Amino acid sequence: MSTPEETDPAAPAESTALAPASSRLPEARAAMAAAKTTLAGGVSTAKALPLGALASDIPAADAPRSLFAAFNELLNRPLALVQRARGGDRLGTGKLFAGALVCYVLYGLAAGCFTGGQDLLLAAAKAPLVIALTLLLCLPSLYVFGALSGVEWSPRLLLALAAGFAGTLGLLLVGLVPVVWLFSVSSRYLAAAVWLHVLLWLLTLAFGWRFLRLSLREAGGRGIMLPWLLLFCLVSFQVATFLRPVLVRDPGEPFFATGKLSMFEHLGRVFDRDEDLRRALHPAPPQR
């Protein structure tokens, strides 16, 4: 008769061979717990990082191959252009400048429908000139304001930001072309058309500020860039006065008017013109 001591030595080997999974279950549970701990630590570390650091760590995509792709990038990923400028990748700013120019011309054509005829070409030529000259005049102040707010400028970064801002304005203006056409062909008085363009321009700059704000924050800027946008707006009004006439040219009037004139005086002349038109359309009855 065998004793427990004679039969037990084979039992551990047999049980290990028959049930290997159950013997490794504690080890599997320990490994899963360690993985959860590591994952939780990684998530908490990511939450602790600032948003700017996370955006900078994302690799920028290659430069868009087409104009549509470049405009689509401005709408969906406005930071990609600045990230490529800081990373040394190809910018593709030529497409943005060319596309913005086309958008300005289309907006000018729609604005020129106010009187039609030769004024179509007048507005189509003056609208790109007004925006391009305004941007050139305000680039030095953008550099200074950005440096004061903490931006570490480089030529590539300044070029990328100028191209992105110009493209954003063009994209917004071309989206307003149907509205501009409608009010241009249905309005009688010049003051109504002027106020419409002023309102749409302010709306365009308000949405263009989104690109500036995000891009300058990505480049390290903080604080005082909103005053630059207000300066850009005022300069654009004076540039439109400097390059007058923009919408309507009287018979015999030169393509570029001469003489000094402020934007407030220019607006006053618009109202005087409308008053003369009212008198011509509704003459006063003769006095008896």
Image: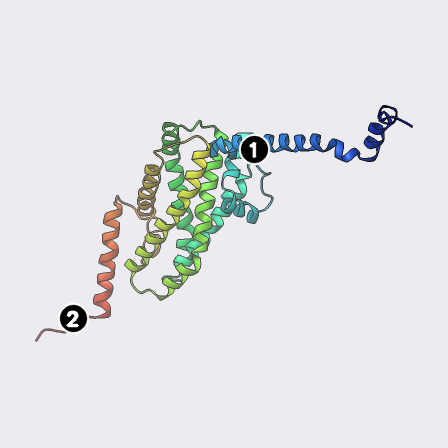
Specify the amino acid type for callout 1.
Answer: Ala
For disc 2, the marked residue is 284
10 Å neighbourhood of mark 1: few (<14), some, or many (≥20)? few
Colour option used? rainbow
Point out the residue furthest to the left here. 288
Q: Specify whether 17 is left or right of 221.
A: right
The picture quadrant where one finds residue 138 is: top left
Residue at image coords 59%, 33%: 39
Specify the amino acid type for callout 2.
Answer: Ala
* Residue 108 place in picture, x, y as percent: 42, 54
Q: Is residue 249 something that shows in the picture?
A: no
Residue at image coords 90%, 27%: 2
* For the residues bearing labels 1 and 2, Cβ distance under 8 angstroms: no
Q: Which of marks 2 and 1 precedes in the sequence? A: 1
Task: Give above or below for 265 relative to 276.
Answer: above
Residue at image coords 9%, 73%: 287
Quarter of the picture holding the C terminus: bottom left
Residue 55 shows which numbered tag? none
10 Å neighbourhood of mark 2: few (<14), some, or many (≥20)? few
Q: Secondary structure at mark 1?
A: helix
Task: Quote the CA–CA distance across marks 1 and 2.
Answer: 83 Å
* Residue 241 place in picture, x, y as percent: 30, 47
Q: Specify whether 89 is left or right of 249.
A: right
Residue at image coords 42%, 29%: 151
Front position in the image: 253 or 288: 288
Residue 40 shows which numbered tag? 1
Point out the residue furthest to the front here. 1
